[in-house]
Amino acid sequence: MLTQNTSNPNTMELTIHHHGTPHTYHLSSDATLQDLSTTLSSTLHIPIENQKLLIAPKPGMQKHPFPPTRLDTILQLDSPRFKITLLGTPAKEIDNLNVEGEETKRKLEARAAARAAAAAKLTTSRRAGGIHTLGESKESYTFHRLLPLSYLPNPDRSLQFLARLRDDPGIRAAMAKHRFSVPLLTEMNPAEHTTSESRTLGLNRNQGEVIELRLRTDAYDGYRDYRTIRKTLCHELAHCVFSEHDRNFWDLTGLIEKEVERADWKHGGQSVSGEEFYNPGDWEGVQEDGLVIDEKGWTGGSFVLGGY
């Protein structure tokens, strides 16, 4: 909401919505997008580079770097749909999540070291004679943490959805076979991954450090088809091995999809048609309709939840 300050015509009152909470600001009448971004950074402590402004009905999503465009030239104040929503995570929350990520990484490294030590001990025991067995736990190959977005409606339902994916018999079998161990499975905020040209369905950050999935409908009034989301998850799991969408990647994705279907005993474990379950051309058609499975595997650097 934007109103003219009658007591001071040189200022305007602007309401910004963040995580469902309205914040009111008084800005100069000639304030720009850059000015607004700087104000939000100083008051809500959200770094400018992490901010996205969803301005409805137009001009839509605005991202860093923000242009020096005057607000009064782009805001459609007479529209009943007028609203400005800030997308971004405060620096303190990002720091807390990064600390949690480092702790998860440390635990996984310690677990891997313990397994290596046990395997070395087993080898030594076999050389000394006798019969010894050491079963590798399939529980190591899973999603070790589930994270719904608490600021979106009904986060408990998203958590149940993520748990269903984690515990899916087909997913569990495929992850155990390929030894996929993913520290974090989380949901994707549709608004942060939607533009006028495309809608991203999934992301794999740093080859398996974090996998994000688009669970919700664009209007946040429901959830997308489970089997379609599971298909996207198979695609993202393949990015744990291959970053580029090359022939090796497509072959692995197809293999994982067939393994998931075959091991899904809850739904019979077989396709009705008996045909292969995956065809790269299927995704090409999806992309033409504005749906993008992902932007290839994100590799290198460090993952920062809330970053761009």
Image (cartoon, rainbow, N blue to C red):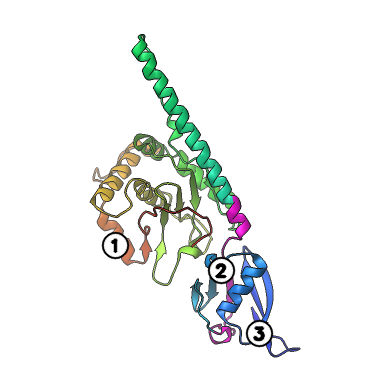
Q: Amino acid at mark 1?
A: Gly
Instruction: Name the kind of residue labelled 2 in the image.
Output: Ile
Which mark, by number, is residue 285? 1
Q: Position of residue 175 (x, y in %)?
A: 38, 38
Could you say which is closer to the camera, residue 220 or residue 89?
89
The amino acid at mark 3 is Ser
- Circle 3 — which element? strand
Q: At numbered mark 1, what does the secondary structure look like: helix, strand or loop?
A: helix
User: Quick one: label 2, few (<14), some, or many (20+) residues within 10 Å?
Assistant: some
**Image position, residue 150 (x, y; %):** 60, 54
Q: Is residue 165 left or right of residue 281?
A: right
Asked where in the image residue 298 lies, by quadrant, the reply is bottom left
The residue indicated by pointer 3 is 28
Kindly state the secondary structure of the residue where label 2 is placed. Answer: helix
Q: CA distance from mark 2 to mark 1?
A: 36 Å
Answer with left or right where residue 296 lies relative to residue 190.
Answer: left
Above or below, 137 against 96 in this view is: above
Residue at (46, 56) in percent of width and height: 214
148 w.r.t. 133: above or below: below
Nearer the viewer's eye, disc 3 or disc 1? 3
Magenta highlight range? 70-96
Quarter of the image holding residue 297?
bottom left
Q: Position of residue 138 (x, y in %)?
A: 42, 31
Residue 298 vertical position relative to residue 33 in the rendered view, above or below:
above
Q: Compare marks 3 and 2 and give the one earlier in the sequence.
A: 3
Q: Real-space Cα distance between discs 3 and 1?
A: 47 Å
- Disc nearer the start of the sequence (3/1): 3
Q: Nearer the viewer, residue 154 or 94?
A: 94
Q: Name which residue lies at 64% across and 73% down.
A: 39
